[in-house]
Image: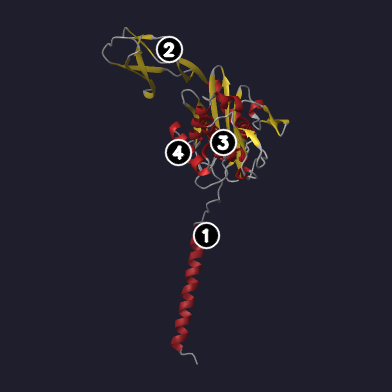
């Protein structure tokens, strides 16, 4: 027989538990739990003028995002700067059957590094990325370290790269602005410009003539387009780094996680060319400041809107004897905001 106090104790305990569960249900219905992937990640973009690195337009441009295969822009830089592009390498087993986009490399196959670079950038070959990384650094881990060092040297401080192809990794990320800076740097490399602006590339493979066709539709869709790289994974969304040159002004557009990446990139680039003009700020041959003849190391241009006005402030040291002596700096401002400084030299 159950004693009255035993029955009452068990009943009260169960009753309190039920009340607590009901309370939690009401609480969580009022404040729904949002999972990590419950809402889609925001897109981001930036338009950058390549020489001055001036940001013309941006949205979420410093938010850390997955770059997918646009990673290969940095991979190409590392290979071009640290490898012999005319060298013929033997494809290792590690580079065969890599997940995702492929140029279908075979173990033991012979390939010239420059042809692999075309396969990397034009066909987005993940297997080419691995083969190139191993040819330069001997391991993917060492190559990733080279990528991080190179990105830091360029000024991409909000990025972290752990592989040469851009397949998903939780610690592999960049920002639209960092990626634009990396691309601006890459455009200084003649071989890179040649590769990313090419629609086709013919090469010899197993004694046969084959051809890579560039996946980048911007080369045909947009007037002046001269690069650069597409990218996509399920977690990154659609990504595109595009470049275009008009009237001597090189613009770079980065869109990350943008469903209509072609139209968005064309819209942003077109807007940049319509609203900005590349303007000569300092001529290399020299000019006068307060009656003193000075010069800069090279012609200095800056993209300006039609109604923008530059203000100049010169900080000069006492007169120095001799030519090509550093004599001070020129500070250039818009609306009292410093936009850049340039060293001045005697003539």
Of residues 120 and 199, the one drawn nearer to the viewer in this rendering: 120
Residue 284, which numbered label?
2
Question: Closer to us: mark 3 or mark 4?
Answer: 3
* Relative to 83, 337 lies left or right: left
Please give the name of the residue rendered at 44% of the width and 35% of the height, measured from the top-left corner. 152
Q: Position of residue 189 (x, y in %)?
A: 53, 25
Q: CA distance from mark 1 to mark 3?
A: 45 Å
Sequence-wise, the earlier of marks 2 and 1 is 1
Residue found farthest to the bottom = 1
Observer-nearest of 286 and 3: 286
Disc 1 to disc 4, C-alpha distance: 38 Å
Q: Can the viewer see residue 175?
A: yes
Q: Residues within 10 Å of mark 1 (few under 14, many from 20)?
A: few
Q: Residues within 10 Å of mark 2 (few under 14, many from 20)?
A: some
Mark 4 sits on what residue? 158
Residue 53, image x and y in percent?
47, 26
Indicate the quadrant where residue 317 lies: top left
Mark 2 to mark 3 CA distance (whole Å)? 35 Å
Left/right placement of residue 298 relative to residue 42 reads left
CA gap, disc 3 to disc 4?
Answer: 17 Å
What residue would you read off at disc 3? 72
The residue at which mark 1 appears reads as 29
SS category of the residue bearing label 3: helix
Q: Secondary structure at mark 4?
A: loop
Nearer to us of marks 1 and 4 is 4
Residue 258 shows in the view: no
């Amino acid at each position: 027989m159950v004693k009255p106090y035993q029955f009452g104790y068990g009943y009260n305990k169960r009753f309190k538990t039920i009340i607590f569960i009901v309370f939690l249900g009401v609480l969580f219905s009022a404040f729904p739990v949002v999972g990590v992937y419950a809402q889609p990640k925001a897109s981001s973009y930036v338009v950058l003028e390549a020489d001055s690195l001036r940001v013309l337009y941006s949205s979420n441009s410093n938010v850390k995002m997955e770059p997918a295969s646009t990673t290969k822009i940095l991979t190409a830089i590392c290979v071009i700067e640290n490898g012999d592009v005319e060298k013929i390498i033997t494809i290792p087993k590690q580079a065969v059957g890599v997940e995702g986009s492929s140029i279908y490399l075979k173990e033991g196959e012979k390939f010239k590094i420059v042809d692999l670079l075309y396969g990397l950038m034009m066909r987005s070959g993940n297997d080419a990325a691995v083969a190139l990384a191993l040819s330069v650094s001997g391991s993917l881990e060492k190559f990733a370290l080279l990528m991080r060092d190179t990105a830091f040297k360029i000024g991409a401080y909000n990025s972290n790269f752990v592989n040469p192809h851009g397949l998903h990794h939780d610690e592999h990320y960049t920002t639209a602005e960092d990626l634009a800076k990396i691309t601006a740097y890459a455009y200084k490399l003649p071989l890179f410009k040649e590769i990313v602006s090419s629609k086709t590339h013919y090469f010899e493979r197993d004694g046969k003539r084959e051809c890579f066709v560039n996946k980048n539709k911007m080369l045909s869709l947009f007037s002046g387009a001269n690069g650069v790289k597409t990218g996509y994974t399920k977690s990154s969304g659609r990504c595109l780094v595009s470049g275009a040159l008009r009237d001597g002004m090189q613009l770079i557009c980065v869109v990350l996680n943008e469903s209509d990446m072609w139209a968005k990139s064309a819209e942003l680039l077109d807007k940049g060319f319509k609203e900005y003009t590349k303007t000569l700020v300092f001529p290399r041959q020299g000019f006068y400041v307060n009656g003193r003849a000075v010069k800069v190391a090279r012609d200095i241009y800056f993209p300006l809107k039609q109604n923008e006005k530059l203000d100049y402030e010169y900080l000069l040291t006492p007169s120095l004897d001799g030519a090509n002596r550093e004599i001070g700096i020129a500070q250039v401002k818009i609306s009292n905001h410093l936009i850049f400084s340039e060293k001045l030299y005697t003539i």
